[in-house]
Image: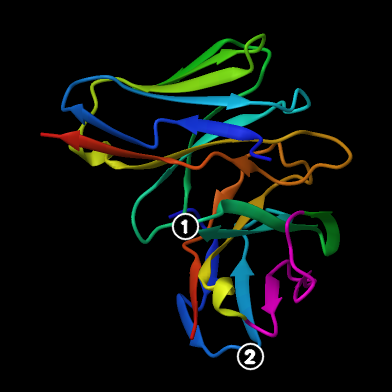
Amino acid sequence: QQQVKQSPQSLIVQKGGISIINCAYENTAFDYFPWYQQFPGKGPALLIAIRPDVSEKKEGRFTISFNKSAKQFSLHIMDSQPGDSATYFCAASKAGGGADGLTFGKGTHLIIQP
Amino acid sequence: DSGVTQTPKHLITATGQRVTLRCSPRSGDLSVYWYQQSLDQGLQFLIQYYNGEERAKGNILERFSAQQFPDLHSELNLSSLELGDSALYFCASSVDASSTYEQYFGPGTRLTVT
């Protein structure tokens, strides 16, 4: 059972455009939603994270939008740059007993064309 | 650089063998998580240790085991290796026991089983 569904699988955006990646989750016990960026040959790097008590969080060119009722969250990359070309993973986890690490989406391969 | 170190970077071994992967967490972090990344399964949580004690278990095979030592470094032991165990293995560390705190990933160990 895939608990976090991520789309699209791949995305091509022109330089300066907005990249949008979407995720949906099933487990209502999830209460922490990070995004990770991974370059080839490297480990995932924490980009930005949100908790369900807010609907939006912005850090520089990166924004997470969160819709608790729809159980969806998305990553927006404004003014996308070629250096943003990477694979992006959404993830979710829950606090308390039975916590079991991060549950990841399948990833989105993002290419920013110059 | 996340501050998490992993050795070795690459490992090539034969089916049926046993290997040990090593991870040193960021300074001050007490939790260590192990994840497996493969093309078909994506990033999957294996196991978590917090301050020397097993905290949570994910999709870890019985042939795999881990431990965390008093100096907080961790080792993941993989035995009776099969071709399907070929993957990237990441460890991540966090300051707290809860998986809802920021996890920082190491550069990974690429395991190839021939």
- Picture residue at 74% right of the left edge, 28% below the top: A27
**Which tag, 1 or 2, sits closer to the chain's start?**
2
Q: Position of residue B57 (x, y in %)?
A: 80, 56
Q: Is residue A89 above or below residue A28?
A: below
Mark 1 vs mark 2, CA separation in Å: 22 Å
* Element assignment for label 1: loop
Report the magenta residues as a range: B58-81
Q: Is residue B65 magenta?
A: yes
**Could you tell whether A62 is left or right of B5 in the image?**
left
Q: Nearer the viewer, residue A57 or A9?
A: A9
Question: In the image, what residue type sits under mark 1?
Answer: Leu
Residue B30: image quadrant is bottom right
Q: Is residue B72 above or below residue B22?
A: above
Q: Which residue is mark 1?
A: B39
Question: In the image, what residue type sits under mark 2?
Answer: Gln
| Residue A43 appearing in the image | yes
